[in-house]
Amino acid sequence: MRRLIVTILLTLLAYASPAKELHVAVNGNDNNDGSSSKLSKTIFAAAQIAQPGDAITVHEGTYRERVTPPRNEVIVRALEAGWSRENIGSHVVRNNVIFNCEQAGIVGSLGAAFSQISNNHIYNIWVKRQFGGAEMAGIKLHGAIDVAIKGNRIHNAGRGLWMDWMAQGRRITGNLLYDNSTDDLFVEVNHGPFLVDNNLFLSGMSLQDCSEGGAYVHNLITGRLISRSEPQRSTPYLKAHSTALAGLNSTTGGDNRFYNNIFVGNGGPPDSGNQADANPLRFGGYGLWVYNHREYPLQTGGNVYFAGARAYFREDGALNLPGANPKLELVEEGDRVYVRLTLGAEVHTAATKLVDTELLGKAKCSGLAYENADGSRVVIESDYFGKKRKMSTPFAGPFEDPGQGGLELKVW
């Protein structure tokens, strides 16, 4: 008899109770306890019984169901087993070359909290499409509390970064993402605060946003954006810099901050008329107009829109340059990567301002401020290269005053 062994990886913890094996069979009964003599009928029923570390043996048969352990129950069980800043996470993953993985380059569920992931080169992930499911990305994390993802190069990875629920206090900064066929960044059912700054998002889909309370600052975004709500799923938000639960909420969408970013369209005219007013739920669009239908408003300022990318409908002071095109090109030469682009003097006129904790305010759902992982005030005072920014009117995008005309910048 063929059997499928399903291990429930709820968290990477040292468990207080010994693991046990639960059994599922098509002739079982969901009122049973899942033991070898009293089998459950569905995987879902067994998942409700399973504790962290348990295994579910699924006996031969056809099972048409989607199994997702209740998220609040997962967290409660993890907390009972000792999931806390003192016991879990704080890993350092840096300076690695990770490639030819058919699921994820780096993946973590709760155990990645408070970690640092930096200066890794991750590529050729999920290229052969040998697997399906919800873990396909260059980096995929659940519960990325106060995680720093910095200075990584991620390309040809299907999905570049996937930040699933409870990515609170996380900072994604100074990363290079391109040629990812799904998207560069997917933020899923998070409530903020989290910070995304000084990144290069250069794939066809730059951002898929199914969260709220994010701050996006000084990024270069050349692909489409999608914004959508998730009213059917309630996910946790936490106390500041902690695993302690503060509450559960669905994801309304919006309540993001977008400051000093550069958006590049596809070279066509700005979307207008019925096309612009329709909710771009499926295909997205270039620029922040995709948030026009979210319930919670955005905070915006200092953003630059090239080549048909379109501003948020409530955005004041946006620099719209529909006829200008930076003609961005990414060039790989051996281990080095260059970005070539053309910038005119008009970019200097963007109404930018220094971004810090005070400007960003507090995320609506969690009520928490945007700050560093140690609780100190955050200031976006350096660019992609670590160069200090002008404090009064920093240059838009990830590069501080890179020059004018045709430019070639070594980004890796």
Image (cartoon, rainbow, N blue to C red):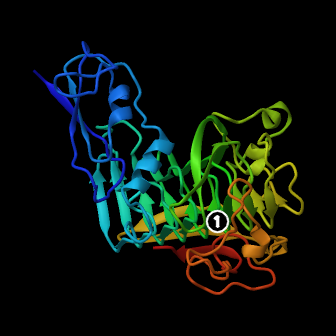
Q: Residue at x 34, y 34 (%)?
A: 49
Kind of residue at badge 1: Asn
Q: Where is residue 81 in the image (x, y as percent from the top left)?
A: 36, 56
Quarter of the image that includes the C terminus: bottom left
Q: Where is residue 289 in the image (x, y as percent from the top left)?
A: 78, 46
Q: Residue at x 53, y 60 (%)?
A: 244
Query: Does 359 sit left or right of 30 as displayed?
Result: right
> Is 204 placed above or below 120 here?
above
Q: Where is residue 63 in the image (x, y as percent from the top left)?
A: 32, 19
Query: Does 344 sit left or right of 177 as displayed?
Result: right
Q: Is mark 1 on a helix, strand or loop?
A: loop
> Is 47 placed above or below 317 here?
above
Q: Give the crowd class for mark 1: few <14, some 14-19, many >=20 residues within 10 Å.
A: many
Query: Does 94 sit left or right of 258 as displayed?
Result: left
In the image, 43 versus 371, the foreground residue is: 43
> How many dots with numbers?
1
In the image, 207 versus 70, the foreground residue is: 70
Residue placed farthest to the top in the image?
27
Quarter of the image that includes the N terminus: top left
- Whether residue 292 is visible to the viewer of this picture, yes or no, is yes
Q: Position of residue 185 (x, y in %)?
A: 54, 53
Give the residue at mark 1. Answer: 219
In the image, 379 versus 83, the foreground residue is: 83
Residue 155 occupies which quadrant of the picture? bottom left
Residue 139 occupies which quadrant of the picture? bottom left
